[in-house]
């Protein structure tokens, strides 16, 4: 999979993709993440990419021309399955969205800044708008990093245990069950006997019951979504 990201501040995205699972995914050739500096398409000697909004009001708006030129330059090189704008008023990210996006080959992400991007970019190019939560960030870079991580870890071969992602929280609209490791008894705090039994069927049933109970207690809204 290849993911292109358009950013005003590409340096913000350097660290998230140079460590841990995302680094290994790229080293294995399973994921390619390319960050593009929008200022390379900026206007004039100062490479302007933002301007005052029509109608007045506080805050600058990312201009249509630099974004359009950047997007079309990238589209001339490959076809994108989705052009995604990270926006507070987009569709809220969930596991089902990341599952679907992980099946694609090429994704393009646009990181907003200031008061956002010129609406004409949204209507002419963007095919999917995504929010990572009901709050506002100073820019879309952190949201893009979250989305890339959520998608990238699902790619076959990225995780050491390929079945691991299938048991993450929010798969099948359930939270993950409790997990334990050695020692089995620490300060009198004991691991549930069932996990030490070696009975795989009973363990899986216990885990499902624990997932269901935890979801009912902490996120009952997920169960209602599944109805």
Image: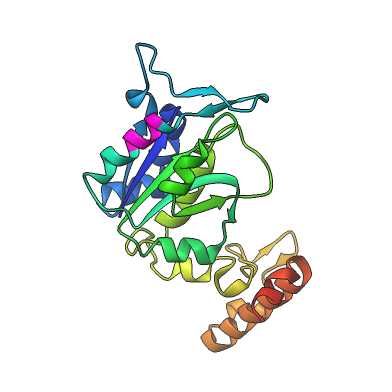
Q: Nearer the viewer, residue 173 or 6?
A: 6
Give the magenta-colored segment's residue range: 65-70
> Is residue 85 rendered to the left or right of residue 115?
left
Question: Residue 14: in sight, yes or no?
Answer: no
Q: Position of residue 165 (x, y in %)?
A: 47, 66
Q: Position of residue 14 (x, y in %)?
A: 41, 32
In this rendering, is residue 41 above or below 210? above
Q: Give the number of callouts.
A: 0
Q: Quadrant of the N terminus?
A: bottom left
Task: Point out the residue furthest to the top here.
Answer: 45
Task: Point out the residue furthest to the left here.
Answer: 77
Q: Position of residue 104 (x, y in %)?
A: 34, 61
Q: What residue is at 44 percent from the left and 34 percent from the top?
A: 13
Q: Is residue 96 in the magenta section?
A: no
Q: Quadrant of the C terminus?
A: bottom right
Q: What residue is at 44 percent from the left and 24 percent from the top?
A: 49
């Amino acid at each position: 999979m290849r993911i292109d990201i358009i950013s005003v501040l590409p340096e913000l995205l350097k660290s998230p993709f140079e460590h841990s699972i995302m680094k290994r995914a790229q080293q294995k050739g399973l994921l390619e993440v390319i960050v593009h500096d929008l200022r390379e398409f900026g206007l004039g000697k100062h490479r302007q990419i933002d301007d005052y909004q029509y109608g007045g009001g506080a805050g600058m708006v990312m201009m249509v021309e630099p974004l359009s030129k950047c997007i079309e330059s990238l589209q001339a090189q490959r076809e994108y399955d989705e052009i995604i704008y990270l926006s507070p008023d987009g569709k809220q990210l969930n596991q089902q969205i990341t599952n679907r996006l992980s099946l694609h080959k090429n994704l393009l992400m646009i990181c907003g800044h200031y008061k956002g991007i010129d609406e004409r970019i949204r209507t002419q190019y963007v095919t999917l708008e995504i929010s990572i939560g009901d709050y506002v960030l100073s820019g879309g870079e952190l949201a893009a990093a979250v989305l890339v991580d959520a998608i990238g870890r699902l790619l076959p071969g990225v995780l050491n245990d390929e079945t691991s992602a299938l048991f993450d929280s929010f798969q099948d609209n359930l939270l993950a069950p409790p997990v334990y490791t050695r020692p089995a008894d620490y300060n009198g705090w004991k691991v549930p006997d069932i996990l030490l039994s070696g009975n795989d069927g009973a363990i899986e049933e216990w885990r499902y019951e624990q997932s269901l109970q935890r979801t009912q207690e902490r996120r009952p809204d997920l169960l209602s979504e599944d109805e």
